[in-house]
Image (spheres, helix red, strand yellow):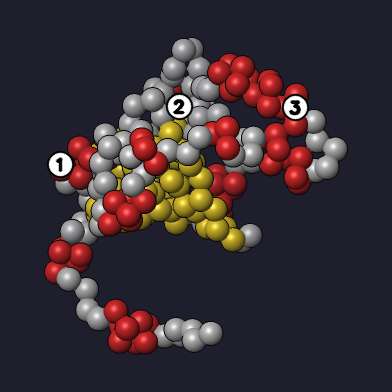
Amino acid sequence: MTIIRTVEELTALYGSTSEASLVKVTSRLTPDYASMIEAAPFAALATVGPEGLDCSPRGDDTCVVRIADDKTVLMPDWRGNNRVDSLANIVRDPRVALMFLIPGSNTTMRINGTAVVSVDPDLTGSFEVDGKHPRSVIVVTVGEVYFQCARALIRSQIWNPERFVDPQSLPTPGTLLKAAKADFDKETYDREWPERAAKTMW
């Protein structure tokens, strides 16, 4: 296997970066970038900590983040698996990255920056849904923001319904858990999961 070891070798292989790829990067949210992000109900949150990297799916029924100003976005930490991997990373290493997906659009948005975990009651309470609010809010300070080339989403045809995978053809969550723990009760888990998720969405 031939392995690239230096940036110089990469540059020799790939050549220079186009002007458009460079000038699209800004240090704050422009009005157009803000409108793109406000259309995104889903984002992947990448964090780093002493144990390594983590990438967590984040979603909401409207915009996945709230834009506070052109340098700050707020992400409520809604119910999940309670591993708190992302939060544990952030309190030890503030570096974060976000990639936003907009249903139907092949243009993705990216934010690189730093974050803190806030438990300010006025802030968490401002995200209240059905009488519930997140236990914390991830406050992200924008370092750089830009849109991503659409080729990956075009190649994958991610929004093409004809390419959607039938969920019945995939292992269930219970099956995946049983593969990790032989005596796990996958039937009960799969049977109870839909109702449990509906009751603990917020």
Residue contact between numbered discs 3 and 1, judged by CB atoms under 8 Å: no
Please indicate whether residue 141 sits to the left or right of residue 32 in the image.
right
- Name which residue lies at 45% across and 26% down: 124
Q: Is residue 20 left or right of residue 41?
A: left
Instruction: Confirm or deny contact between disc 1 and disc 2 (CB under 8 A).
Output: no
Secondary structure beneath dot 2 equals: helix
Which residue has dot 2 on it? 124
Of 23 and 141, the residue lying toward us: 23
Q: Is residue 202 above or below residue 139?
A: above
Residue 27: quarter of image: bottom left
Q: Amino acid at mark 3?
A: Glu
SS of the residue under disc 3: helix
> How much space separates mark 3 and mark 1, taking CA atoms?
49 Å
Q: Mark 3 vs mark 2: which is more N-terminal?
A: 2
Of the pair 10 and 53, the residue shown nearer to us:
10
Identify which residue is drawn at 55% across, 29% down.
79
The x and y percentages for residue 114 are 40, 53
Position of residue 35 relative to residue 135, above or below, is: below
Could you say where residue 103 lies in the image, as x and y percent from the top left?
31, 36
Secondary structure beneath label 1: helix
Q: CA distance from mark 3 to mark 2?
A: 36 Å
Indicate the position of residue 193 as horizontal and vertical percent values: 64, 24
Q: Is the residue marked by circle 3 packed among few (<14), some (14-19), or many (20+) residues within 10 Å?
A: few
Q: Which mark is residue 187?
A: 3
Tell which circle, 3 or 1, labels the residue nearer the N-terminal end: 1
Residue that label 1 marks: 31
Residue located at (51% from left, 45% from top): 56
Residue 179 image offset from top left, x and y in percent:
75, 45
